[in-house]
Image (tube, helix red, strand yellow):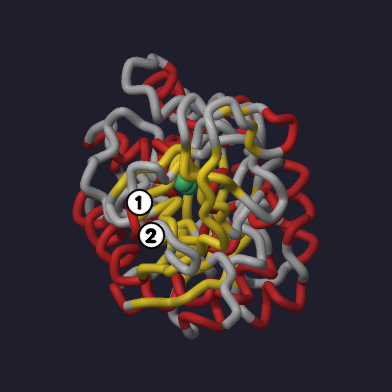
């Protein structure tokens, strides 16, 4: 027997979530953001499943990620590299027709020298103040490009997860010089949360990421998105401790009554955050069980007193999935679902299910 934590990846759920985001999008449809190993779900199998579902445009952060998408989806899909020329090797760009997202006038100048002949996107920074050509420089960018048209005109919203924020509308307004300088270039505005804000934000090609994997911290997130993965770990040992006895490093938990403690084979060495100590949870046989004590590198302890005989060595605890909601689990560790799935390490076995 060789028990280790496992993530069952539900490719059909991810495809169904994509179809849903695609149907919600305007005529530009939905692309798919598969950077960071498809948010920890596996970039190759996820890209293939999405291409089979009809997705034609993929977004990654790095050229090497784009190479893996190209291998998985074949020659027809469009693949954009968010981090631009610095993240993209010439050989990969040409052999896999990867499209850089150009993020500054300096990068446009470099692009003109390189002359790779692949299409490219132009990113306008309307308020993130992170990457992109600033609106005041859009005229200069158009001059530099001298009639060469981007295949996509992109911006990215800072506060799309908060429908009450005035920032998203302000960002859309500050895109207007770019719309004038680059008429007829297809637009791409919204991530997952932006799509839920309303039709004007769904113009052009949308760029959902987290929604495909069943998460998202927007209050507008539909509650019935399907989980992209079920993260499970096996129980190694169950023991009863007495009132007042401590559990784990630092003895941060003390039993308030006689308690059945299950010690489970997963920890921060696998990507479960230490911040989930005494606050995260799992499910065994449909029963919710709190994490008690500190999350350690290889082990987590749960109070399984309410579970009964199902809590025994070899039984699986669900830490993420249909019962253990990604965003609820993330909130218990003061973070977002993005960090939980992207942080899963190589010790977690990925099992692909259709
Ligand atoms: C990561 C990313 C996305 C996807 O965002 P989600 O919130 O996961 O939907 C979209 N656009 C850009 C520029 C990104 O970096």
Q: Is mark 1 within 8 Å of ligand 1?
A: no
State the residue position of label 2.
228
Specify whether residue 184 is in view: no
Residue drawn at x 46%, y 61% as measured from the top left: 232
Of 45 and 321, which appears nearest the observer? 321
Residue drawn at x 57%, y 73% as measured from the top left: 3
Place of residue 336 in the rendered image (x, y in percent of width and height, measured from the top left): 50, 36
On the picture, is 55 further left or further right than 350?
left
Q: Is residue 13 above or below residue 107?
A: below
On the picture, is 324 further left or further right than 36?
left
Asked if the residue at tag 1 contacts the one at tag 2, i.e. Cβ–Cβ closer than 8 Å, the answer is yes
Place of residue 268 in the rendered image (x, y in percent of width and height, measured from the top left): 67, 49
State the residue position of label 1.
214
Place of residue 13 in the rendered image (x, y in percent of width and height, measured from the top left): 29, 64
Of 204 and 245, which appears nearest the observer? 245
Image quarter hosting the N terminus: bottom right
Residue 134: quarter of image: top right
On the picture, is 326 further left or further right than 95?
left
Which of marks 1 and 2 precedes in the sequence? 1
Q: Tag 2, which secondary structure? A: loop
Of 92 and 284, which appears nearest the observer? 284
Residue drawn at x 40%, y 57% as measured from the top left: 311
């Amino acid at each position: 027997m060789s028990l280790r934590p496992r993530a069952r990846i539900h490719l059909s759920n991810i495809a169904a979530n994509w179809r849903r985001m695609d149907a919600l999008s305007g005529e530009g449809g939905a692309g798919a953001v598969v950077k960071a190993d498809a948010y920890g779900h596996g970039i190759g199998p996820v890209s293939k499943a999405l291409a089979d579902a009809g997705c034609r445009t993929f977004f990654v952060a790095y050229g090497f990620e784009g190479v893996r998408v190209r291998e998985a989806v074949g020659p027809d899909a469009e693949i954009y590299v968010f981090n631009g020329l610095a993240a993209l090797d010439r050989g990969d760009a040409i052999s896999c027709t990867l499209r850089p997202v150009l993020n500054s006038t300096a990068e446009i100048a470099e692009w003109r020298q390189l002359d790779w002949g692949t299409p490219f996107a132009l990113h306008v920074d309307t308020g993130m103040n992170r990457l992109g050509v600033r609106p005041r420089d859009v005229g200069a960018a158009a001059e530099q490009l001298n009639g060469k048209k981007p295949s996509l005109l992109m911006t990215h919203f800072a506060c799309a997860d908060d429908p009450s924020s005035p920032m998203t509308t302000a960002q859309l307004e500050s895109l207007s010089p770019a719309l004038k300088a680059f008429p007829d270039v297809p637009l791409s505005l919204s991530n997952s949360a932006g799509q839920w804000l309303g039709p004007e934000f769904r113009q052009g090609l949308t760029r959902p990421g987290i929604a495909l994997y069943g998460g998202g911290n927007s209050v507008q997130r539909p509650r019935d998105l399907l989980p992209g993965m079920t993260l499970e770990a096996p129980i190694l040992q169950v023991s009863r401790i007495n009132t007042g006895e401590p559990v784990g490093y630092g003895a941060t938990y003390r039993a308030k009554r006689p308690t059945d403690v299950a010690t489970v084979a997963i920890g921060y060495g696998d990507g479960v955050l230490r911040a989930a100590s005494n606050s995260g949870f799992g499910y065994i046989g449909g029963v919710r069980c709190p994490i008690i004590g500190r999350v350690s590198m290889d082990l987590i302890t749960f109070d399984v007193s309410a579970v009964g005989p199902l809590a025994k060595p070899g039984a699986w605890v669900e830490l993420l999935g249909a019962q253990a909601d990604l965003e609820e689990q993330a909130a218990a560790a003061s973070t977002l679902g993005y960090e939980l799935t992207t942080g899963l390490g190589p010790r977690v076995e990925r099992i692909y299910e259709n």
